[in-house]
Amino acid sequence: MSDVHDKIEYMTELLVPWKPAWNTDVIPCSTNDPMSMPIEHLEARICELAGHLTAATCQFLLLVADFDARQGWASWEVPSCAAWLSWKCQIASGTAREHVRVARLLGTLPLIRGEFAAGRLSYAKVRALTRIATPETEHDLVEMAGPMTANQLERFAQAHRRVSREEQQEVSRRRKLTWRYDEDKAIGITLWLPPAEGAVVLQAIRAWTNDVEHPHDPADGGPARSRAENLRQQDGSDGIVWDGENPPWQREKTPAEDMADAIVGICGGYLSGRAAEADNPDTYHVIIHAGTGAISVTDDVGVSAETRPDDAALPVTHPAYAMRCHVEDGLALSPVTLQMIACSATISAMFHDASGNLLNVGRRTRKPSAALRRAARERDRYRCRFPGCESRRIDLHHIVFWANGGETKLTNLICLCKRHHSLVHDKGIVIAAVGGGFAFYEKDGRLIPASPPLPESSADCITACHDAVITPSTIIPPHSGERLDLNLAIWTCFANARVSAG
């Protein structure tokens, strides 16, 4: 750098022009059989096809952006463009939402859109860049993204978002709770709250663990105080009292396990109170599905449930499997944990036939009983059954309306979300039981497909989906395998931004 005021180019320029380690010119090959062609040709074809896929993905997202802007999805009675993509294009719900987010932003980021359309920026990189780029910063960010791998760019984008936030404003308004399943073994919960509200939660946890009689040092999550301040015996004016023998930091900290138990206890107490006064207690119950073999060591004839002849051929996911044991629509539990919970829990029986179908437990009443609600939710896997919908916020709908003589029994009930429950009534959609499932028909008799088939296409037509010039080296970044210096990358990015801003 010749001058400290010059724009920093270290992270965006290569000292030596980059070239791939192999010849990327298209060389004729005498065979199209991947197992017979030389490895160099196979590698080049993979990279070239990756470039075509990237350019075609850009065109796909631009079409999605136009479709979303014109609300073409609304005529299909779905709540959003992401829901339409999930249903019509066989894309997972989370992936569909991310596609729509990126598609909407591509229109405001012409440089990123151009590199994406040319096949030089992969979708993974574009997805990361659209989280941090603005029309003013996209030029520098595209230059920095070029030499990075997709994983490195994800790390860079995360760090960029943390640094670019105005810390005080973010802390004051940040309020978020997230959770994730850790390899189907545990649930990790992360909670972010402003200081005042976080203090309320901490005080409740400490009250549950009987740990409110003394101040807490920083290691315990309490207010930060210096050791010198803690050493001074106070008169109580600032809330610290020391007897001269056991300084606060030497007191035994509340174990992390007890803090976790406190959260469970507080939540359990709240649910118990709500369930006691609710018209529908099931709303506030944690429901566990368990087979007879899991809830007891042996069955009523003294034979281990795992070795019963009628259960031997059943898969573990079968509703009639004797050792079944899991939280409703959630993770599996060990039989030991289940048996401990069963000591104080309410147990309701649910009977299945040999095929796993729930037996009819219906009653001649309009309002389904608690047992019937559980049975219907279990059969429908706790989700709306309308084609293309995966909502968990569901109502029970009488297939044959109650006013038309329909009974309140399992075979006449189906789980629908509020939107599709209303749609079925408003549009006169007909629901029929077919082969252990349900089929939905328009009022004129047209079938509503569960997942429309994708149109047939040949492998060669992808080149007609875009007008980018793709070679085997187009998608390959100028990356030599070095590790990302994240601190330098972030410092360079924000230094460049300050210089550009003048």
Image (cartoon, grey):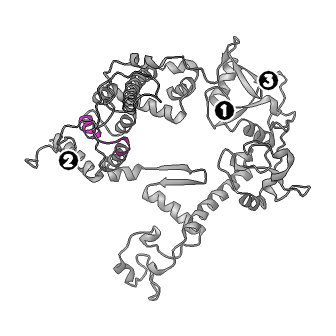
Helix, strand or loop at mark 2: helix
- Nearer to the camera, 333 or 419: 333
Instruction: Look at label 2 and name its amino acid.
Output: Ala
Mark with earlier residue (2, 3): 3
Instruction: Look at label 1 and name its amino acid.
Output: Cys
Return the residue at label 2. 495
Q: Main secondary structure of the magenta part?
A: helix
Return the residue at label 3. 400
Q: In this rendering, does residue 366 appear at all? A: yes
Q: CA distance from mark 3 to mark 1?
A: 17 Å
**Outermost residue toward the left in this view:** 2
Q: In this rendering, does residue 346 appear at all? A: no
Residue 360, given in percent of the width and then of the height, sits at 85, 35
Residue 92, given in percent of the width and then of the height, sits at 54, 33
**Above or below: residue 190 compared with residue 215:** above
Return the residue at label 1. 384
Magenta stretch containing residue 13, yes or no? no
Residue 44 - label: none
Residue at 70% x, 57% y is 334
Residue at 90% x, 55% y is 300
Q: CA distance from mark 2 to mark 1?
A: 51 Å
Q: In the visual, does 73 lie left or right of 496?
A: right
Q: Which residues are magenta?
A: 138-152
**Outermost residue toward the right in this view:** 301
**Above or below: residue 389 compared with residue 335:** above
Instruction: Look at label 3 and name its amino acid.
Output: Val
Helix, strand or loop at mark 3: loop
- Nearer to the camera, 480 or 87: 480
Mark with earlier residue (2, 1): 1
**Above or below: residue 468 compared with residue 161:** above
Residue 240, given in percent of the width and then of the height, sits at 43, 78
Residue 345, given in percent of the width and then of the height, sits at 77, 57
